[in-house]
């Protein structure tokens, strides 16, 4: 049994080991590993894509771990198999302790029907996101039918997670100003569903937050998708829910909303369309990242870049002129 | 007298003609023109950079033309020379009629101390922005000491304008929801000053809008610049003003705020730092754009791209695998 077969059809222990080995191979930066990794991906691809991909974001302290643990156990009790992946661009600094740390989800992490993988700990957000996307395909090929991709609410990682999932959920605290921060970062706009967590601590504040966010999303949506589809009954309108993950209150309503979203999106063919669009965007993101890396590693560019950077900074040469000289150094090599 | 000399020191008629000729050269896409354009830029650069660069944005209907005409005439009366440039990524569609149309500013456009140039009408936002940046240097070399770069509040052009100016001003209408749209698009965050125009039409609504935007900017700023500099008296805190451009009311207060911003920023060395950072960002934006263009034009890439795109769309190959194959086709040519 080779690696892809073990991932798709191994018994529990062998499968778990094969998944870990496969993801480690996909995360490797060695050139020979990369060729093996591409072969593995191509073998797994026919078995992938059958899960529901759920993105979850929220700032530190919002209760993501508690929420995901409660949700994961709730879903396993309904017969699902749940994989949890994480994207944390800061994990190369923090050693990956913020996200994906198995001790955060003590019951879920030891459950045979769950697989938890911390954030890849290397490089740029684009690189981390690419590795997580590939890990998602491995988990799907292994038969996990719910894949949760979580990220911490800092930086641009929310866009990356929304760009690889079927539904994007934003966890919020019932604090004034949190919604403005989410709007500012463009995260509110990405959300298919907003969940106000810890609603039990201050029910009045949670009610106010729900009203404010609902109103803000209505205004934000005015120039967006809503205008195109007044008469489309399969259309989902972003919603705002309250719950308490700690007390496991509201998970049933949360999952009912997710299921309704999934049903409407599948009926309209939107999940397949969203995934096609995501795949193409991902391909172009990887191309742009690869071009930039090749540029920075080109010997002629490396020879010219420091001097031209200084000239641009002190105003001796226009930035666009410097850019053209550097591009010519890479793309039009002198004989 | 060659072109750069005519731009720097020509008499009024010769200079105006030379500016137009120089900008047209900079906007040309012909390869031989490009070399001449780079030579011109390098000659002009020592004479550029001495203006105050003011970015102005606002949605259609907010009254940008009326505001800029009133402001331009106000500044000329104080002895300034004023250039107005525009960035309108839609102008290739609209024929440039939205922005930069001289009939919009009937008095300013015929004034000998003003120079108005419509948006370049070609290509991507990055290309349009690059050409406008270069046009700005031409106007500066010709001695215009106030350069206004305007853009319409759609798309990403606000970021481009904020990225080439010393101060970014957002015009808003006193309408509920306008501020949320500006926050959503990340424009509120870019604004050094927010101006509520047409305040005379509904003074109560204008007061409410001013209070709301002031409060929103305070919350948005909490995680930003404010926290770093509690004791820095040269620090500017973003402000919100009301005025009526149509009645020319409030221009003096507006310009007093701009002057105070400029004074504080220059005292702290921040304008020079902002310009250095803008130049480097501009250089990298042009490099990335050039790399992508070279990729799309590469014969091997063009041969592979349609087939690989279809494979990615139908799930036959992973997006990252396709990206690696395309990059190899360009960067590792087979002998």
Image (cartoon, coloured by chain):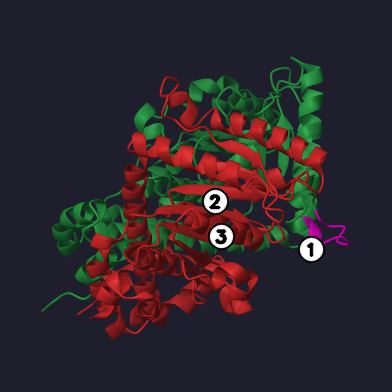
Chain colours: A green, B red
Both labels 2 and 3 in a single chain? no
Q: Is residue A290 left or right of residue A240?
A: left
Q: CA distance from mark 2 to mark 1?
A: 36 Å
Of circles 3 and 1, the one toward us is: 3
The residue that disc 3 covers is B73
Give the residue furthest to the left.
Answer: A335
Circle 1 chain: A
Residue A259 shows in this picture: yes
Tell me: residue A31, above or below residue A259: below
Residue neighbourhood size for the residue with mark 2, other residues' Cα within 10 Å, grouped as few (<14), some (14–19), many (≥20): many
Circle 2 chain: A
The residue that disc 1 covers is A228
The residue that disc 2 covers is A141
Q: Which residues are magenta?
A: A226-235
Tell me: residue B221, above or below residue B323: above
Q: CA distance from mark 3 to mark 1?
A: 43 Å
Give the residue furthest to the top.
Answer: A201
Question: Quick one: SS at disc 1?
Answer: helix
Tell me: residue B298, above or below residue B147: below
Residue A242 shows in this picture: no
Return the x and y of residue B213 as percentages of the image width and height: 67, 37
Both labels 3 and 1 in a single chain? no
Q: Earlier in the sequence, mark 2 or mark 1?
A: 2
Return the x and y of residue B22 as percentages of the image width and height: 35, 77
């Amino acid at each position: 049994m080779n690696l892809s077969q073990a991932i798709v059809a191994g018994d529990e222990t062998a499968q778990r080991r094969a998944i870990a080995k496969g993801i480690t191979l996909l995360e490797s930066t060695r050139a020979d590993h990369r060729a093996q990794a591409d072969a593995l991906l191509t073998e797994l691809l026919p078995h992938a894509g059958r899960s529901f991909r759920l993105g979850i974001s929220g700032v530190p302290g919002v209760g993501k771990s508690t929420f995901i643990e409660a949700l994961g156990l709730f879903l396993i009790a309904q017969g699902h198999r749940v994989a949890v992946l994480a994207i944390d661009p800061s994990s190369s600094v923090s050693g990956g302790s913020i996200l994906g740390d198995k001790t955060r989800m003590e019951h879920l992490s030891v459950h045979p029907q769950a697989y938890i993988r911390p954030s890849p700990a290397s490089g740029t957000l684009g690189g981390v996101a690419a590795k997580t996307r590939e890990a998602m395909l491995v988990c799907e090929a292994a038969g996990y039918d719910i894949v949760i991709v979580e990220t911490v609410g800092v930086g641009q990682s929310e866009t990356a997670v929304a760009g690889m999932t079927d539904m994007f959920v934003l966890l919020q605290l019932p604090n004034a100003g949190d919604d403005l921060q989410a709007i500012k970062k463009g995260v509110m706009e990405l959300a298919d569903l907003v969940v106000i967590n810890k609603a039990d601590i201050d029910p009045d504040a949670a009610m106010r937050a729900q009203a404010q966010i609902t109103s803000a999303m209505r205004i934000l949506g005015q120039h967006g998708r809503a205008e195109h589809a007044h008469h489309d009954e399969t259309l989902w309108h972003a919603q705002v829910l309250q719950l308490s993950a700690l007390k496991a209150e509201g998970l049933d309503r949360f999952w009912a909303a997710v299921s309704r979203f999934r049903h409407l999106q599948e009926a309209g063919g939107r999940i397949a369309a969203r995934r096609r669009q995501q795949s193409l965007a991902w391909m172009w993101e990887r191309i742009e990242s690869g071009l930039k890396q090749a540029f920075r590693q080109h010997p002629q560019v490396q020879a010219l870049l420091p001097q031209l950077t200084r000239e641009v900074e002190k105003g001796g040469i226009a930035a666009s002129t410097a850019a053209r000289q550097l591009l010519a150094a890479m793309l039009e090599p002198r004989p």
